[in-house]
Amino acid sequence: MSDLQSLPLFHRIAGQKVLVLGEGDAAEPKRRLVERAGGIIIDDMVQAVDEGVRIAFVAYDDAKACEVAAINARCAGMLVNVVDKPDLCDFTTPSILDRNPVLIAVGTGGASAGLAKHVRLRLERILPQSLGRLAEALFGARPKLRELFPDGGDRRRALDEALREGGALDALDGKSHERVDAWASGELAAQASQAAECVITSDNPEDLTLRQARLLGEADIVCVVGDVSKEVLARARADAIRIDCDVSTCPNAQRGNASSSGDSSPPRCPRAAQQFALSGSRNTLTVILRWQSPD
């Protein structure tokens, strides 16, 4: 798993003062960004220091002026962004896809703003305009959800099942927000617990199929059979329970290649089934990751 070059955060600045230094084409987009987020722009370093401003954008044309301003602002305790100079930045500004209150930020750590923009434009075509309304409807349904699913784990699993591709509240379905009340009231049937098998033949997570990547992102429990790489395992949900199975005793290790073994029985993990039965959980998804040599 690669290290993060930056820690992505969403910072609330509504009603707060933000220092923006510079004029022209470089500074103006930063001013608009701050205003759009509800920030109050000031353009004087002394005032910013005196008033304890925490964020600064520097967009001078002169490189030396940018460096001096960045040092002064940082010494005053501000987080600094210097336009087009990532080496002088404490943070970078991403390309933003707005489906308020859903915000998707695409960043490259300052490597290429153009690349970030075009990734965002592709996502613009995929994500429905109603995505924000779905988020608002789910927020409004929280009391009903707590009543329907008192256990936090059950509630999360039910949401995962509903929001997944093809689910009752599929996140990419433009009309999902219209069904939230009915779903939260229990009028739409919840799916039973299920298990799915993913046969892994590569250590590279980029070789995962779309289905395998989706299942890993939704799994409540991951049953690992064989030498599945840590890079592939990193694609699983961070809070998923992980079971490392002994290949000499695990029934899934004996299934072999699904295309040649003739075993069409549904996949199952006895240890996962026992664990969830003991906890009383429902609507669970177990993903069995089975390593199979490509040779």
Image: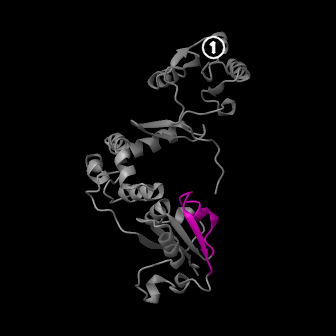
**Would residue 179 appear left or right of 17 to someone viewing this image?**
left
> Is there any visible trace of residue 272 in the rendered image?
yes
Residue drawn at the location 29% of the way across and 62% of the way down = 189
Compared to residue 250, the image places residue 38 above or below, namely: above
Tell me if I can see residue 200 in this picture: no
Residue at the image point whose x is 33% and y is 45% from the top: 128
Q: How many marks?
A: 1
Which quadrant, please, contains the N terminus? bottom right
Which kind of residue does numbered mark 1 sit on? Answer: Glu
Q: Position of residue 270 (x, y in %)?
A: 51, 79
Q: Is residue 210 left or right of residue 246?
A: left
Q: Which residue is mark 1?
A: 51
In this rendering, would 4 be left or right of 264? right
Task: Name the element at disc 1.
Answer: loop
Residue 61 image position (x, y, % from top left)? 62, 19
Residue 257: say if magenta.
Answer: no
Residue 136: give x, y in percent of width and height.
Answer: 35, 40
Task: Write down the region rendered in magenta.
Answer: 227-246
